[in-house]
Amino acid sequence: MKPKTRILWMQLHAYIACFFLPAAILYAITGGLYMLGYEGGVKAEHEYHLELKGGWPEDKSEAKKIVVEQMAQRNHHESVPDDYYLWEGKHDWFGFKREVLLIPEEDGQVELKIIEHDFWKQLLLIHKGFAGKVLKVFSILWGLSLIFSQVSGVILALAVKKIRVNSVVSIMLGLSFLVTSYFVG
């Protein structure tokens, strides 16, 4: 590899690694905390019992219209999260800042529940992909940068004659460990 090409690879490797370092630290910390059982908590929870004139909304868009209207009436001007689930008969909008549920009750009423996540839970939910479109795209780009960093690191290692053999041995050891882990796990 020509010296100018090697320097270009080194610069790309370094700048991309530096740009995504904060994301790497965030994901390492939140992933580690999650593996240790820490999932964050609830900052605030609001429950409202409602009587709906039209009965229980079966349709997602109809339910969201009711939720948005009821939240505005109760001075909750924050947005309803994008991710939606129909879960155990409940309408559930889930995001990294809050969760909004519309739950049928036995007496014909409906419960509107707004759960505000604390800071640590928000960080964990970013890690799990509930972070809105911009952070999701950033996370995908970070994942691609990890692949680029690995590939560029291997290219640089294989370009240096002094460490080429040890680099190939290291790649083979890594592959062996991965295959063994798969069959053992």
Image (cartoon, rainbow, N blue to C red):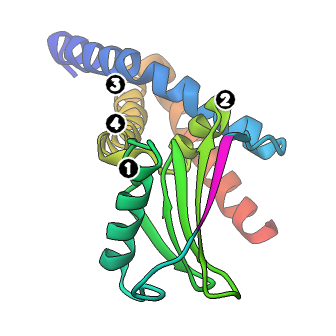
Specify the amino acid type for callout 1: Ala
The part of the chain drawn in magenta is: 44-49
Relative height, residue 99 to residue 119 (above, below):
below
Please tell me the numbered disc located at residue 148: 4
Which corner quadrant holds the N terminus? top left
Relative height, residue 31 to residue 104 (above, below):
above
Left-right relation of 113 to 66: right
Image location of residue 149, percent across then percent down: 39, 31
Relative height, residue 59 to residue 76 (above, below):
below
**Judging from the image, what secondary structure is the residue with disc 1 in?**
helix
Q: Earlier in the sequence, mark 4 or mark 1?
A: 1
User: Considering depth in this image, is 51 or 41 the residue closer to the camera?
Assistant: 51
Q: Earlier in the sequence, mark 4 or mark 3?
A: 4
Q: Residues within 10 Å of mark 2 (few under 14, many from 20)?
A: some
Give the residue displayed 57% in from the left and 38% down from the top.
Answer: 122
Residue at which label 3 appears? 159
Specify the amino acid type for callout 2: Ile
Residue at which label 1 appears? 72
Specify the amino acid type for callout 3: Ala
